[in-house]
């Protein structure tokens, strides 16, 4: 055995020992663990399982993770307000999450805690104002048009054709976030024109190769490695990434490291070019177009750099912190929106009547106003309902920094069966926030909570507000749903995301300039097998084709599409 392997196994044993010797502390009812090692089985049926646990045991439940670790699985509205808004400082992201994000993306929002995070939010929040987002509308719209052209090139005039739309939606989402956040033309939709940076960014998504998921095995080791090997930990990583170490996991790790290096070097160049362009406004746009295509100064990073430069010294972020935001935002805004647009198209494909109604509304609006950015209420309803029912990030973690009691809206049972309306937690308790169960909670969304019904958002004008019942609602930043979370660590880019998903989804159904929109329906077929799409739950949801028609693993979304001529 080699030295790095001995150290690796040693650290793993230490981590396992720490986990195994944990005491039972969570006084809550919940399902038995299915497996002594794995806890809850992470099978492809996780979606239904996570909902069933909340339906069977209530909105605060004890579940088990790896090595029997007790997890507080929570979707109660009052508890989530307490955890994410009121006492957020007691419920932080865990060390492993923060440290890994810092190693991969630098010092951006998802890599910082406490005062540093608060300072960053204060600077960045105004950058995502509605007026700044509206400035980006035309850029997103033109990328949506380009997506349309690419899809149309794959369709013949009259007959329908099957098309895996997922890679194109992913490329389009990357172009949107690169243009919107960096002012960088990634040209991902122009498939033959990728450069090293664009390819590296594509690789951090789930569609191409989920390096972040596949190297997850190293994550628990990171705090131990960085703390105990201090200055030498980089050397340790060098050993791990030596080319002669054979396993696939290590190869994935090496590839992730290469991707991080490409991202880091490119974002530094873009950052320097931006600073130069802002310092020397006399340069013409073509002079200021640097290695990566220059900036229009409307993008989020340009606005952020400008506003940072004019803020007080106490509020100002360092260059390293500004740089970190670039990588973090590309990551945070890329596959989350890909998944949401893909899900919206899939839902429209399965509900032709909704698709028809949406198309009619879009065509009517265009006939009446002739504009491309009229607000479409039915399109908004389709997007909202999709984001509610299928949140791109279904569950997320937090850890308590001190012992605390969490109040509940809806009482649950303790381990011994008595009713409790608050849950005492010890320090370092791992919490699983279930966005999924919150968004499906019948107590606030009604008995049809798990049905896809865009109309529920239209009825709100008749006096009922979706997601509010008897004064009880979730604290989410977006329409009372938890998809973009709540409080000071909620999604900072939700307005950007909503705008992009809305334009991408309605652009596929009705189009203002050509009036030759797409129709899609789920494809049946080849070899007599129906291509049934299933959404696998991981860090994000990803569509795959069920066996035997597909392999049940490769992310893809085959739709049958045809052009509709009026
Ligand atoms: C459908 C699309 C999206 C969904 C569902 C989504 C959801 C979320 C969620 C749940 C979080 C909290 C994560 C956590 O606490 O661990 C988050 C954070 C974040 N999101 Fe989004 N997001 C989306 C799109 C975007 C976009 C387009 C951007 C940027 C342009 C963005 C930027 C961020 C950032 C920077 C954070 C970290 C905020 C912080 O820690 O203060 N997101 N997002």
Image (cartoon, grey):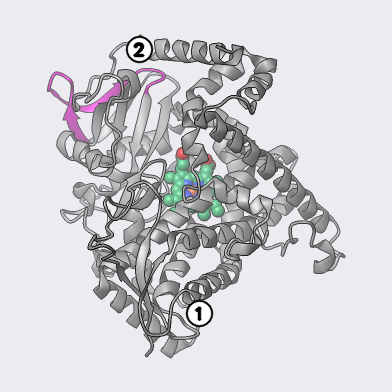
Element carrying mark 2: helix
Q: Using the image, determine if residue 48 lies above or below residue 62.
A: below
Report if residue 307 is visible in the image.
yes
Q: Which of pointers 1 and 2 indicates the residue nearer the eye? A: 2
Based on the picture, tell me whether residue 414 belongs to the magenta stretch. yes
Residue 550 point in image, percent of width and height = 32, 53
Q: Residue at x 52, y 52 (%)?
A: 334
Task: Please give the count of numbered marks on the rendered protein.
Answer: 2
Q: Residue at x 50, y 45 (%)?
A: 209
Choose the circle earlier in sequence order: 1 or 2. 2
Element carrying mark 1: loop
Residue found at the far front of this picture: 527
Callout 2 environment at 10 Å: few (<14), some (14 to 19), or many (20+)?
A: few
Quadrant for the N terminus, please.
top right
Q: Using the image, determine if residue 525 lies above or below residue 325.
A: below
* Cα distance in 3D space between marks 1 and 2: 59 Å
Q: Using the image, determine if residue 171 lies above or below residue 251.
A: below
Instruction: State which quadrant residue 451 falls in.
Output: bottom left
Query: Considering depth in this image, is 514 or 360 the residue closer to the camera?
Result: 514
On residue 512, the disc is: none
Residue 262 point in image, percent of width and height = 68, 43
Residue found at the far left of this picture: 417
Based on the picture, tell me whether residue 460 belongs to the magenta stretch. no
Callout 1 environment at 10 Å: few (<14), some (14 to 19), or many (20+)?
A: some
Instruction: State which quadrant residue 394 falls in.
Output: top left
On residue 372, the disc is: 1
Residue 344 point in image, percent of width and height = 36, 62
Please give left or right for residue 91 compared with residue 69 in the image.
Answer: right
Q: Which residue is mark 2?
A: 20
Q: Using the image, determine if residue 418 lies above or below residue 461.
A: above
Residue 178 point in image, percent of width and height = 62, 57
Q: Which residues are magenta?
A: 410-429
């Amino acid at each position: 055995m080699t030295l790095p392997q001995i150290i690796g196994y040693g650290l793993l044993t230490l981590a396992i020992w720490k986990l195994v010797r944990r005491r039972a502390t969570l006084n809550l009812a919940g399902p038995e663990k299915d497996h002594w090692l794995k806890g809850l089985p992470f099978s492809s049926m996780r979606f239904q399982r996570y909902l069933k646990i909340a339906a069977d045991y209530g909105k605060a439940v004890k579940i088990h993770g790896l090595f029997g670790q007790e997890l507080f699985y929570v979707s109660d509205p009052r508890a989530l307000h307490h955890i994410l808004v009121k006492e957020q400082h007691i419920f932080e992201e865990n060390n492993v999450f923060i440290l890994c994000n810092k190693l991969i993306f630098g010092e951006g929002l998802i890599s910082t805690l406490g005062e540093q995070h608060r300072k960053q939010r204060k600077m960045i929040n105004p950058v995502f104002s509605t007026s700044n987002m509206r400035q980006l509308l035309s850029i997103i719209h033109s990328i949506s048009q380009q997506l349309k052209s690419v899809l149309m090139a794959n369709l013949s005039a009259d007959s329908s054709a099957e098309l895996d739309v997922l890679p194109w939606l992913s490329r389009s989402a990357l172009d949107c976030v690169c243009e919107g956040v960096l002012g960088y033309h990634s040209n991902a939709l122009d498939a033959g024109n990728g450069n090293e940076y664009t390819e590296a960014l594509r690789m951090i998504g789930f569609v191409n190769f989920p390096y972040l998921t596949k190297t997850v095995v190293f994550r628990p080791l990171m705090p131990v490695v960085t703390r105990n090997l201090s200055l030498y930990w980089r050397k340790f990583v060098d050993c791990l990434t030596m080319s002669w170490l054979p396993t696939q996991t290590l190869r994935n790790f090496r590839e992730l490291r290469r991707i991080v290096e490409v991202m880091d070097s490119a974002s530094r160049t873009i950052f320097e070019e931006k600073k130069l362009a802002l310092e020397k406004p006399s340069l013409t746009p073509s002079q200021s177009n640097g290695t990566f295509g220059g900036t229009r100064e409307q993008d989020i990073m340009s606005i952020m750099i400008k506003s940072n430069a004019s803020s007080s010294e106490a509020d100002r972020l360092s260059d390293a912190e500004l740089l970190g935001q670039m990588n973090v935002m590309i990551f945070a805004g890329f596959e989350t929106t890909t998944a949401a647009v893909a899900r919206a198209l899939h839902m429209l494909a399965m509900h032709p009547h909704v698709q028809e109604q949406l198309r009619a509304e879009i065509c009517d609006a265009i006939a009446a106003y002739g504009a491309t950015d009229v607000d479409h209420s039915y399109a908004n309803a389709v997007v909202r309902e999709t984001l509610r029912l299928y949140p791109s990030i279904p569950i997320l973690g937090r850890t308590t920094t001190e012992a605390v009691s969490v109040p509940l809206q809806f009482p649950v049972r303790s381990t011994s069966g008595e009713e409790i309306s608050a849950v005492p937690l010890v320090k370092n308790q791992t919490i699983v926030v279930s966005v999924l169960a919150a968004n499906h909670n019948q107590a606030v969304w009604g008995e049809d909570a798990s049905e896809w019904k865009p109309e529920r958002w239209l009825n709100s004008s008749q006096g009922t507000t979706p997601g509010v019942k008897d004064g009880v609602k979730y604290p989410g930043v977006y329409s009372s749903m938890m998809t973009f979370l709540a409080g000071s660590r909620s999604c900072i880019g939700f307005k950007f995301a909503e705008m992009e998903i809305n334009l991408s989804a309605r652009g596929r159904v009705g189009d203002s300039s050509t009036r030759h929109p797409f129709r899609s329906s789920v494809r049946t077929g080849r070899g007599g097998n129906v291509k049934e799409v299933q959404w696998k739950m991981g860090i994000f949801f990803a569509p795959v084709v069920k066996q035997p028609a597909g392999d049940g693993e490769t992310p893809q979304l085959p739709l049958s599409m045809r052009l509709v001529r009026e």
